[in-house]
Every structure is written in C-alpha cells, then in structure tokens.
Amino acid sequence: MSNGAELRQNTGDSAIGTRVDLGDASLNEQLYAGMNRVELVLRDELNKGADFLTEKVMHLTKAGGKRFRPMFALLASNYGPNPMSDEVVKAAVIVEMTHLATLYHDDVMDEATQRRGVESANARWSNSVAILAGDILLAHASRIMSELGVATVAHFADTFGDLVTGQMRETIGAGDGDPIEHYMKVIEEKTGVLIASAGYLGAMHSGADEDTIQALSRTGAAIGMVFQIVDDIIDIFSDSDQSGKTPGTDLREGVFTLPVLYALAEDSAVGEQLRGLLTGPLHSDDEVAAALSLLAQSQGRARALADVHHYLAVVDENLATLPDNATTKALRMLAQYTVSRVG
C-alpha cells in the first residue's frame, strides 16, 4: 500500500482478526496478531451465560465490523513498555463491547431495521430483547473492567456518563440553543468519547507515561469527530456507487447532520428554500432530490469539511508530541484515509 490505509471489514462466523494495511509490514502483522487475540477474547467472553443470552449478544458480533476502536487501543499500546499485553487486549475488548452495546440501544431508539448488513436485534426479536442484549454486554464489560483495576473502572464510569449524556442531549434536542453547537457536542459525546477511551486505556495498560496517554486520548477524540462528520458529508454528497449508501437517508428520517445544519443557517436564497423544505422527515423521492440539489448549491459541504480539517490538525498536533515511528505514521494515515472517503 502506498497512498493510504486500507480497512477490511470482519464478516461472518469464520472471520477472526481484522486485517489492515498501515504501510509497514511488521506493524501490519503485529496488529493482525493482536486483533486475533481481541476477537478470540471477545467471543469467549460473550459466549458466557445462558444460551438464550449468548444468541442475542453474539448477533452483531458475528455480523462483523471494522473493530476500529480495539484497533486504536492496540496501536496506542505501542507507546508503552508493554505493547499489546493481555491487559491491553482486555481493555480493547471492553471498548468494543461498549460500542456494541450502544449499537443495540441506538437501533431501538432509531427504530432501525438493519445493522451491519443483517436484521437489527430489535427487528429480529423485539425492543426489549435488544435493550437487554445491550445491557448484558455492559455487564460483561464491567466484569472485565474489575479485572483491570479501579483506575479502569473509574475511567469507564466517566465514559459511560458521557455516552449517556450525548444520547440524552440528542434525544432532547437543541431547544433554544445553537443547533450546530448542540450537534457538535452530541457527536463529541456519542462518538469521540469512546475512541478517546480506546486510546487512553490502550496507552495506560501498556505502561505509557501520562503525557502520552493524554495525547492519545485527544487524538482518539479528534479522530472520532472526523469519522462522524465525514459520514455526515457522505450521506448527503456521495453517490450510492461510491458510498454503498442511499444519499439522503438521514433526510428521510428527519435527522439533520452538520452539513445540513450549516446550509439551513445560510443567509441566502438556498438557505431560505431549505428552511421551507426541511421542516421534518422527507417522505417522497422528489422531496429528497430537491433537498439534495439545494444542499449541493449551499456552503454546507465546504463548512463541514473545514471542521474535518480542523480536527485533522488536532490529530497532527497531538501526534507531533509522540515518537516519529511506524505507529505514529499509521495513526496519521488512518485519519487521512477517513477524509479520502469524501472524495
């Protein structure tokens, strides 16, 4: 690989570790071995308990995923004297379990019918089953946290608090506040915080010093913001052949993401037309097409992309404090890869 990271999604029962190309053969193999260990521990832990529980909690695990959060934890551990130790692997598993739990809960709140290319748990069984599956994932994660010590439990108490705050903030809405500031805070709490936690715990459990731990936590938070804003841009401005998604999906659901919020705030004819059109979910293909056309004429994409580059600068600022080695280059590459998806 010469010009960017490549992430391959894990799918199916036979998939084990996520394989990535980070531009360094030795690091690729080290990370692949680590991700194998993460996957084996994850599946072993989630297979504990009654059969009627394990079937549900393994549903999304078997469906796959890129496992970016545990991958980031493993990479962060390369800055300490005990990279990819057993404790680091457990920390990576905790982060992924927590992420999976939020997916079960989000699908209930969003009334989603699909997740990772399979039927969502709430659609396959019921909302109650999906909520309880998320809860048992958090129970598994809590048990492993207790094995890693009080510092890990305390850190994750803060992380849980931020995740729930973000979900509650999104549910209540911006009210009389600035919708753009509100949205940025929501994605910081719902997306950024868990990737930040992956960096924090991976570095901490490898024995890294405090400055390094904090730098990796800030890097993870910024990468999380980049991920979410890029997804927002792709939903509106990419064709389905490129993204694999139907453009305007969020608009159909009445979800107004960052580029849309910027466009709605415009003091222009386009902004005025959008404010008249986007008063709730869009129900017809013609309405969606009209909204997408207006958004393409707006400054929404450019302003959202400017925010992406702001957070990329935060990533670079923090990575500049770390050793200039293959892992640092890989982290920088992963952030740039995310932006390249915009086209």
Image: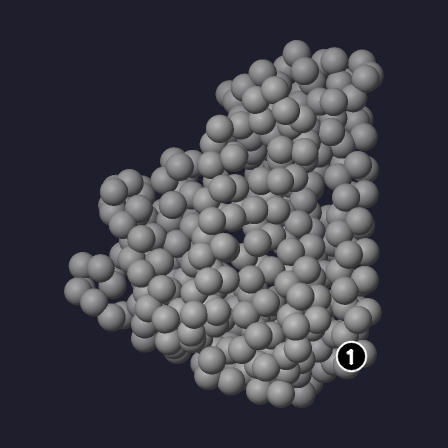
Q: Residue at x 70, y 66 (%)?
A: 215
Q: Is residue 336 left or right of residue 107?
A: right
**Residue nearest the viewer, comparing 253 with 132:** 132
Q: Is residue 69 left or right of residue 14?
A: right
Give coordinates of residue 64: x percent, y percent: 44, 63
Q: Residue at x 49, y 55 (%)?
A: 158
Q: Quadrant of residue 267?
A: top right
Label 1 crowd bin: few (<14), some (14–19), many (20+), radius 10 Å = few
Q: Is residue 116 left or right of residue 80?
A: left
Check the image and report above or below for 124 versus 79.
above
Q: Residue at x 35, y 58 (%)?
A: 138
Viewport quadrant of the N terminus = bottom right
Give coordinates of residue 210: x percent, y percent: 66, 72
**Residue nearest the viewer, comparing 89 with 159:** 159
Check the image and report above or below for 53 versus 90.
above
**Residue nearest the viewer, comparing 104 with 115:** 104
For the question of whether residue 240 can be seen, the reply is no
- Mark 1 belongs to which amino acid? Pro
Give coordinates of residue 297: x percent, y percent: 80, 26
Name the residue carrying label 1.
323
Q: Quadrant of residue 313?
A: bottom right
Q: Is residue 321 left or right of residue 281?
A: right
Give coordinates of residue 190: x percent, y percent: 54, 47
Check the image and report above or below for 145 versus 27.
above
For the question of whether residue 140 can be seen, the reply is yes
**Residue nearest the viewer, comparing 317 with 10:** 317
